[in-house]
Image (tube, grey):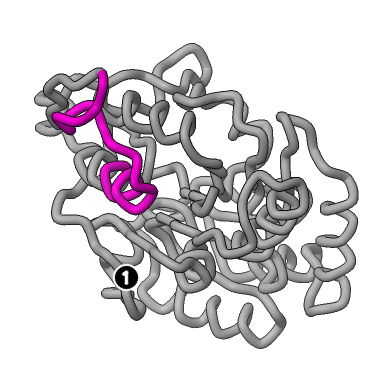
Amino acid sequence: MNVLVATDLDRTMIYSQAAMGEAQFAALDAVCVEIYRDAPLSYMTTTAVELLARLAAEVPVIPTTTRTPAQYERIALPGSPFRYAVASNGGRILVDGADDPDWRRAVERAVSESGAGLDEVLTELRSRIDESWVRSLRIADDLFCYLVVDPAGQPDEFLPAWQDWCAARGWTASQQGRKIYATPGSVTKSAAIAEVRRRLVDDGTITTDAELCAAGDGWLDTDLLSAADHAIRPRHGELELLGWSAPGLTVTTGTGALAGVEILEWFLDRCSVRTASDPGHPNARAVGTS
């Protein structure tokens, strides 16, 4: 096998109703893939559900998310169960759903050797915020932290100043909608995917020349997109706002959940996996963008 797929989840594969937009949500046949506090939270289109299941049946697909393991486990992704998943922005590798303690210990060593600790970051962050625009401050997996904010009330100078402070201490700060993340620079999705790739080569699942195809929409995905042989991002989200690009990067034509469908079609094309819309496929039938 010569392809490995790593994909971000939120606003790349799965979408809240707000992320889809009211018009798109009303027009598309959406399938709920996440329930939180007894209410539907995240969706995929029926076409995306079919395409992701087909892709996962043909090539190794690694869900790669900033979500903690507990947050990741709430999602009922098509193609599950996945042999490997990357959670906590690379801070965790899940193997058949279970945390890999060796990887976590390696991550903790790297963080301790590379810059400020979480406590120092939290102390500084608390000194810079107030309740007029910050709804909550959350700690994720004892590894990084993030704010949930009211963007309309957020001071213009906060993010650039916070990014400068973090960068000087080995951390990265980025904003995705209402969330502002602070993560250790040594904890990356690309490092975790490189480890998963090594294991898949060692056990013969993929060949040494296997190409990495990756997708993501936020700043925390840029290291993964840059490391991939083929990369794609949606025409929305943090990277779209930043105008971020890289050599060979593909940007979708559509936005919202339609971009998710486009990304999956792109993966299938790169993996030479024919979809059900291909007349040559044994189960050929029409597939739309519903």
Q: Percent position (x, y) of residue 128? A: 58, 70
133 horizontally vs 72: left or right: left
Q: Percent position (x, y) of residue 185? A: 67, 73
- Which secondary structure lies at badge 1? loop
Q: Amino acid at mark 1?
A: Leu
Q: Percent position (x, y) of residue 266? A: 28, 50
Q: Is residue 252 above or below residue 227?
A: above
Name the quadrant of the C terminus: top left
Which residues are drawn in magenta?
264-282
108 horizontally vs 153: left or right: right
Say which residue appears at 79% left-offset and 76% top-offset.
Answer: 116
Q: Nearer the viewer, residue 227 or 123?
A: 227
Rendering quarter of residue 74: top right
203 horizontally vs 102: left or right: left
Q: Nearer the viewer, residue 172 or 46?
A: 46
15 horizontally vs 190: left or right: left
Q: Percent position (x, y) of residue 69? A: 68, 36
Q: Main secondary structure of the magenta part?
A: loop
Q: Nearer the viewer, residue 48 or 182?
A: 48
Q: Nearer the viewer, residue 289 or 160?
A: 289
Say which residue appears at 49% left-offset and 12% top-offset.
Answer: 38
Say which residue appears at 66% left-offset and 56% top-offset.
Answer: 197
Q: Is residue 178 above or below residue 58?
A: below
Rendering quarter of residue 215: bottom left
272 inside magenta stretch: yes
Q: Please count the marks in the image.
A: 1
Query: Which residue is disc 1 drawn over?
Result: 249
Q: Is residue 182 above or below residue 281?
A: below
223 inside magenta stretch: no
